[in-house]
Image (tube, rainbow, N blue to C red):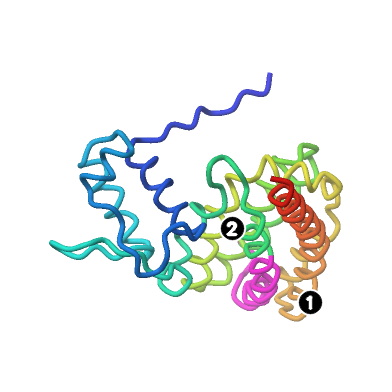
């Protein structure tokens, strides 16, 4: 029996998601004023405190600007928001946003080889031992979702070894966005399960303190996965566009 945790959202969370979707989808343009707290509460059928809490949280993401005693206006989230917004953008209304997912995969593919090179420079025996343990778990895994979780665990160790706070914070945000989509992504990456050798090469390079080989090995690990995912996201985007045209 494949049971999944029940996802519960507070009223404030639901208000947050609805208003965010309106902004991201362009239903509310940059510079446009949101309805008043009172009006939003009436339309959404919730309390004003719940609306106020949601708006304050949205303002913290950089998506809107709340002016004391004035209107709440939409900002250009592409210029003002940070990576902490990614988890909210990736899955909205229970649906995976293919464009956001593509961006995450592209960022991961470009950034991770550099992190691996730094890990080779700055890591040590403890890093190599921890990575070897994760690779052993990968070798024992046959479930696509479990496989992806172990891959994330491997990169968690690599990022720690790179000893870069900026890369750590970036990884945290990318992981927070990536993890909710694992059931979908795991199904897309079934062919990757069991292909352990590239990870062993990566771990050996980091353990040997060889940045060049670590960078190349990371690229070898990531490129096939990126290709599979990007092709799948392109197909999802094309399917969505066809559906809109038919409608």
User: Closest to the observer: 34 or 2?
Assistant: 34
Q: Secondary structure at mark 2?
A: helix
Q: Quadrant of the N terminus?
A: top right
Is 235 on the left or on the right of 104, as rendered? right
**Residue 70 x %, y %:** 17, 63
Disc ID at residue 12: none
Q: Quadrant of residue 230?
A: bottom right
Disc 2 marks which residue? Answer: 156
Q: Main secondary structure of the magenta part?
A: helix
Question: In the image, what residue occupies the spot 32% across and 41% down?
Answer: 12
Q: Which residue is mark 1?
A: 213
Marks 2 and 1, how far apart in space?
19 Å
In-image side of 155 versus 164 (left or right):
right
In magenta stretch: residue 94: no
Report the magenta residues as a range.
106-126
Residue 31, located in which quarter of the rendered image? bottom left
Say which label, 2 or 1, has the lower sequence index.
2
Nearest the viewer among 67 and 109 is 67
């Amino acid at each position: 029996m494949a049971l999944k945790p029940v996802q519960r959202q507070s009223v404030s969370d639901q208000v947050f998601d609805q208003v965010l979707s309106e902004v991201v989808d362009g239903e509310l343009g940059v510079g446009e004023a949101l309805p008043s707290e009172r009006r939003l509460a009436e339309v959404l059928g919730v309390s004003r405190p719940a609306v106020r809490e949601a708006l304050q949280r949205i303002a913290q993401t950089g998506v809107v600007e709340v002016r004391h005693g004035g209107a709440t206006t939409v900002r250009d989230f592409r210029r003002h928001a940070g990576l902490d917004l990614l988890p909210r953008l990736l899955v909205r209304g229970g649906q995976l946003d293919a464009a956001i997912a593509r961006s995450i995969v592209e960022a991961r593919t470009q950034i991770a080889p550099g992190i691996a090179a730094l890990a080779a420079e700055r890591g040590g025996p403890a890093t190599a031992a921890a990575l070897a343990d994760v690779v052993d778990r990968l070798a024992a895994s046959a479930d696509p979702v479990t496989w992806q979780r172990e891959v994330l665990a491997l990169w968690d160790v690599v990022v720690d070894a790179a000893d870069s706070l900026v890369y750590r914070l970036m990884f945290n945000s990318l992981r927070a966005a990536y993890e909710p989509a694992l059931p979908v992504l795991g199904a897309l990456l079934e062919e990757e399960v069991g292909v352990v050798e590239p990870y062993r090469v990566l771990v050996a390079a980091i353990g040997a303190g060889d940045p060049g080989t670590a960078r190349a090995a990371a690229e070898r690990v990531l490129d096939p996965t990126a290709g599979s995912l990007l092709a799948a996201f392109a197909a999802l985007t094309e399917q969505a566009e066809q559906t809109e045209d038919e409608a």
